[in-house]
Image (spheres, rainbow, N blue to C red):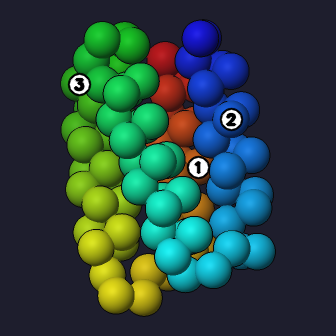
Amino acid sequence: MTIPHQIWILEEMLETMESLTVAGQRHNMEKVLACLRRIGGPAVGLSPRNNQTFVLLLEQLSDQVRLAMPDVGEFTTRARAVAALLSAA
């Protein structure tokens, strides 16, 4: 599966996030985070600076997932920023 296709799937998951229960949101957040980890990083051609940003954003996403009441809006914004980095690579 190509990166653009994977990002399209992630975007679809992010679009439905608000309509899910908290448990469903957390489940989708974990899936989005795992997918971003799998497709991203130096192997996709990120510059050192963008890779550093990628790693930082993934840490922030991971922190959000671990919260008792994660902020879906914040998670979605950061996940889209990561997707934009990967799309530009």
> Can the viewer see residue 58 in this picture?
yes
- Is 20 above or below relative to 85? below
Instruction: First in sequence, mark 3 or 1: give its number.
Output: 3
Query: Which of the marked residues, 2 or 3, is nearer the chain's N terminus?
Result: 2
In the displayed structure, 42 sits above or below 16; it is above
Q: Position of residue 82 (x, y in %)?
A: 47, 43
Q: Where is residue 85 drawn, in percent x and y? A: 49, 33
**Residue 36 at x, y percent in the picture:** 42, 37
Query: Which residue does the numbered mark 1 point to in the structure image?
Result: 80
Q: Is residue 53 above or below residue 41?
A: below
Closer to the camera in the image, 42 or 71: 71
Residue under circle 3? 48
Secondary element under disc 1, as helix, strand or loop, is helix
Q: Report the number of discs.
A: 3
Q: Is residue 77 visible?
A: no
Residue 88, by quadrant, is top right
Label 1 sits on what residue type?
Answer: Arg
Instruction: Judge depth for marks 1 and 2 and give the one in front.
Output: 2
Q: Which quadrant of the rendered structure holds the N terminus? A: top right
Q: Helix or strand or loop: what does disc 2 sit on?
A: helix
> Of helix, strand and loop, which one carries label 3?
helix
Mark 2 is on which residue type?
A: Ile
Identify which residue is drawn at 61% across, 26% down: 6
* Relative image position of residue 60 (x, y in whole percent): 30, 63
Q: Depth-wise, is mark 3 or mark 1 nearer the camera?
A: 1
Q: Give the mark nearest the N terminus, 1 or 2.
A: 2
- Left or right of residue 73, residue 20 in this image: right
Residue occupied by mark 2: 9
Crowding near the residue tagged with mark 1, few <14, some 14–19, many ≥20 C-alpha atoms within 10 Å? some
